[in-house]
Amino acid sequence: MEIYAQVFDSTYGTSASGIRACLTRWGATGWMMIAEAEANADGRIGDWNVPQLEHGLYRIVFDSDSYFAALGARSAYPQVIICFRMRREDNGFYVQLTLSPYSYCTYFCAIEAGSTGSQARLRLG
């Protein structure tokens, strides 16, 4: 299973290049950090450098405060946290975040097992 993320900045009409995020998973002792990443020039995080993800409860924590501070803006939301469940039948998960200093919205969908490459079918999560 894989998790893909993409972030857009609606204030400036660009990809949120450089925004930092961490991926966590719910376990027996609570939320465990799995990986940290930074969005590329297209605002994408496609490789968390994690060997294998299993089904379960995950969340991505985006550091919107530092991102907007670097642009000289202040943000009402220091972090944007998106929590979701990866089911056994999912091949992967796509999380999209569109943010501005005072609002954000998300979109997510599952990538069905058995779908590969350009033939991947997205299913609403």
Image (cartoon, grey):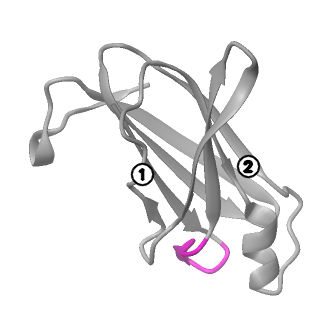
Name the secondary structure under disc 1: loop
Quadrant including the C terminus: top left
User: Which residue in the structure is indicated by mark 2?
Assistant: 80
Q: Nearer the viewer, residue 40 or 35?
A: 35
Relative to 89, say whether 109 is above or below: below
Relative to 71, say whether 56 is above or below: above
What amino acid is at disc 2?
Answer: Val
Image marks 2 and 1: residues in contact by CB distance under 8 Å: no
What stretch of residues is rendered in magenta? 11-18
User: Where does residue 104 sit, x and y in percent of width and height?
Assistant: 70, 53
Query: Which picture quadrant has residue 81?
Result: top right
Q: Which dot marks residue 49?
A: 1
Q: Residue at x 43, y 43 (%)?
A: 50
- The residues bearing labels 2 and 1 have C-alpha atoms spaced at a distance of 21 Å
Q: Nearer the viewer, residue 81 or 13?
A: 81
What amino acid is at disc 1?
Answer: Asn
Is residue 39 rendered magenta in the image? no
Is residue 17 rendered magenta in the image? yes
Relative to 10, say whether 25 is above or below: above
**Label 2: few (<14), some or many (≥20) within 10 Å?**
some
Q: Which dot marks residue 79?
A: none
Q: Quick check: 35 left or right of 79?
A: left
Name the secondary structure under disc 2: strand
User: Where does residue 22 sit, x and y in percent of width and height?
Assistant: 63, 50
**Label 1: few (<14), some or many (≥20) within 10 Å?**
few
Quadrant including the N terminus: top left
Q: Quick check: 56 left or right of 122?
A: right
User: Where does residue 67 sit, x and y in percent of width and height?
Assistant: 72, 72
- Magenta span main SS: loop
Q: Residue at x 75, y 17 (%)?
A: 29
Q: Residue at x 89, y 60 (%)?
A: 76
